[in-house]
Image (cartoon, helix red, strand yellow):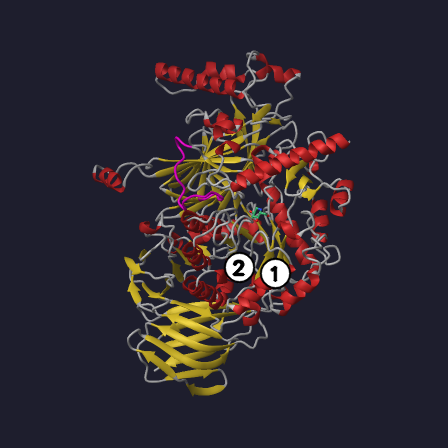
Amino acid sequence: MAAVAVRRRRSWARFALACLGLCLSTAFAVDRSNFKTCDQSSFCKRQRAIQPGFSPYRALLDSLELGPDALTVHLVNEVTKVVLLLELQGLKGNMTRIRIDELKPLRPRYRVPDVLVADPPTTRLSVSGRDENSVELTVAEGPYKIILTGRPFRLDLLEDRSLVLSVNARGLMVFEHQRLPRNSFSEKVSLTFGSIWDKIKNLFSREERKETAEGNGSPNEEAAEKADQPEENREKDDKDEPGAWEEMFKTHSDSKPFGPTSVGLDFSLPGMEYVYGIPEHAEDLRLKVTEGGEPYRLYNLDVFQYELYNPMALYGSVPVLLAHSIHRDLGIFWLNAAETWVDISSNTAGKTLFGKMLDYLQGGGETPQTDVRWMSESGIIDVFLLLGPTISDVFRQYTSLTGTQALPPLFSLGYHQSRWNYRDEADVFEVDQGFDNHDLPCDVIWLDIEHADGKRYFTWDSSRFPQPLAMLEHLAGKRRKLVTIVDPHIKVDSEYPVHEELRSQGLYVKTRDGSDYEGWCWPGSAGYPDFTNIKMRAWWANMFSFDKYEGSASNLFIWNDMNEPSVFNGPEVTMLKDARHDGGWEHRDIHNIYGFYVHMATAEGLIQRSGGTERPFVLARAFFAGSQRYGAVWTGDNAAEWGHLKISIPMCLSMGLVGLSFCGADIGGFFKNPEPELLMRWYQMGAYQPFYRAHAHMDTGRREPWLLAPEYLGPIRDALRQRYALLPFWYTLFYRAHLDGHPVMRPMWVQYPKDVATFSLDDQFMLGDSLLVHPVAEPGARGVQVYLPGEGEVWYDTQSHQKHHGPQTLYLPVTFSSIPVFQRGGTIIPRWERVRRSSDCMKDDPITLYVALSPQGTAEGELYLDDGHTFNYETQNEFLFRKFTFSGNTLTSSSADPRGHFETPIWIERVVILGAGKPASVLLETEGIPETILTFHHNAETSVLTLRKPEVHVSTDWSIHLR
Ligand code: NOJ
């Protein structure tokens, strides 16, 4: 025993040294050799070897059955004879679902549970036409027809006779059926993937030869006959496919007791040239073609020092791809939680605009088309086609399936101050006081792993944090919060009750042999709770009750880090794929959803501890489709480099497109020390991104804003104040995201879907439909080139109030204090303009409305208010949703949702109208109260009209007339 302990200590020390070495190494670059390429991932390699045009799958049209909710049809692989079941559903709201599984699987294949919020309502399909090789289906609700072709299997979705999307048009579908283990009789004689592929090619070439000879294209009887023989009668000398039953990566062996089980499918998108989504990658907003390079990988991984502009996997995965053209939008949601790769190709890739124009002049050229191919290691094919036709429709469709962004508590939209680590209570008090001393607003202070006793989460290091409750009370007195980290790896220590309970209740992930799986992480040897187990999640949620998590209080919230899960000594820094979860599923099946479950259980714990009344705040690093229901995410361990500042825009935009609106990047960069200018610019950019938190690695120098020279501190203070002034706007945007899935932070093309110049823009973005933000992301910048889109649109610089016309590329000179932000003419934005210590101090403050007039002299906007922290908005309708409209020289306030009622002292203290002429008088009309005259000030130079003190209550209906 003692020897084992010593060995363990030694290897831990070696491991810690290795980590330290890595941390201190000066060269900042990912070690690519730690992560697989497609070639090193055997299923990806197998699938990618398949070339288009040889699909062995045939839909047996005679087997077609139409039920009330779905159509089913058998698909046969003409070489292996294995029969699959295809289920096709028309879903309400212009969606189609395709599921393909084995008809008679040796064991059930994993179907991803808990991601869909409900069984999506279906709409009837009926057969509206038929010939010998195809069936035409009509969708009861929706403008679509679906053509199912028998041989080779293919689905085409058409709207008004024009093709919108095809499935398996390139014939790249793969469904590796399950086989018995290799020593059993049937496996010895079964065909390997490579040999099947050879046979497919043979089959096709024989057919081609015959077709050429016969010249009539009739089916090749001989080949079909051969293919009709059962597998066992065919060649018996096939060699095992490398990686099919066991795969090595570095020193790690991945046993595959169920053999190869991968699935893949291709989608052709005619008319589409721009595709987006499938986060998380440190990539441009617009996805690139992957031909000749690596596919985009979706496999939640803790990537140390990630590199920019490459398709390597990162911490989270959302298997949703969006396609956009000036004519329409659509989405593909590939519901599979296993390791997944996505290949993108396009017939216009590499062609310059000039080349495309030349094509056009020479007679049209090809219709642009993008082809997307999904490849997953296990599970079934379960795919939702989100058929738009507008991007708004796609947002609604996707979030109707997986849920919308949880409405965050108001405080969480304020500023968060974090670092690894705030040393002790005195340090926390000092940082908290630092904000007050320097007139900087702040809502939350964060404690990283060192706050806990030896990284035993749910505990406190008693020498550094002897009185957590008093510390929390102190912060509550300042109307601030604390966040502590609770990671999903649990120190193996028989004295640690959390570990002992999990162990004794059998709630840890197991190895393939059934013992508790152990890996290395921050605490040393650690167990990994099996969050896929509902009992485990209930147990975990209960851990956040105030009596269980001692030293916690209602102003303490949670950060779930390392939930990919990160396993320092595991393959690719994560869990062995043959580890076992509840129900006997392999980790391979569920990997990408593990982090989602951690987030879910923690959020549920915070709700439960309040008896179901309080909204939770939980930040998680790993995520999956649907994680938006549980809180916020961030872009992980970035670096103090200008490139990392820039990439935070496309990274958060990509997440917003697929439901995850509450996204941010570590302000200042996690690794390395930012130069003051970079830190300042990051504060300025972060003020306009949804999740606003500064965070830093333990080896970096302290960088609280007041440690910077005054020329940097001043602009940081301004940025923080701008953030806080816009909190009512942020809160309203989040309510919108919560209602109908529209992202808070949006790519320019979402607002200007017909303006091709916006389709690849990712150095600027929109907040809702009102603010355009073009952060300064270059050192020593003297100016920025801002693209102000929109024919007939006007844009008001929010600092100078100067009006600019769209479309134009504007060169805007900048200084240290500039954050180029423009309010779109035609919008109204609410602000809180009194400077306070935290959002909680502002929540009853009066509102100032900024009305930016369109060239037609109109504008509209909205304001959402509630208590900022409970579910009463949902359960008791305790909210106010107001609509403001300016037209015909009159600004009116009315209810946007009459169900809402909410007691609040908030009133409108000022109205600022941008682009206004000088009126002779201004009259306020409120229901039941005689008209009053308002005082105003008009600045002729800037055309800004300020109406002072309307003093109307925010919940009443009123009109202000400019005469
Ligand atoms: C990795 C996280 O990404 C980082 O933010 C955190 O500070 C460290 N883990 C330590 O907990």
Give SS at disc 2: helix
x then y, percent, for residue 266: 45, 34
Q: Quick check: 499 left or right of 691?
A: right
Residue 537 position within the rendered picture, expressed as x and y whole percent measured from the top left: 69, 47
Residue that carries the numbered disc 1 in the rendered image:
428
In the rendered image, the quadrant that contains the C terminus is bottom left
Question: Nearest the camera: 202 or 590?
Answer: 590
Q: In this rendering, does residue 609 appear at all?
A: yes
Instruction: Report the residue at 60% width, 44% height from top.
Output: 563
* Whether residue 365 is situated above or below residue 655 in the rendered picture: above
Residue 287 magenta:
yes
Q: Position of residue 941 (x, y in %)?
A: 28, 75
Q: Is residue 291 shown left or right of residue 942? A: right
- Mark drawn on residue 142: none
Image-based side of 922 in relation to 559, left or right? left
Instruction: Tell me the chief SS of the magenta region.
Output: loop
Q: Nearer the viewer, residue 237 or 511?
A: 511
Q: Is residue 654 magenta?
A: no
Give the residue type at disc 2. Answer: Leu
As shown in the figure, which amino acid type bears the numbered disc 1?
A: Val
Q: Is residue 590 visible?
A: no
> Considering the image in quadrants, where does the N terminus appear?
top right
Residue stretch rendered in magenta on the structure? 277-293
Residue 231 percent coordinates (x, y): 57, 17
Q: Do the residues bearing badges 2 and 1 touch, measured as CB atoms within 8 Å?
A: no
Give the alpha-carbon distance from disc 2 to disc 1, as whole Å: 37 Å
* Residue located beneath label 2 in the image: 739
Q: Secondary structure at mark 1?
A: helix
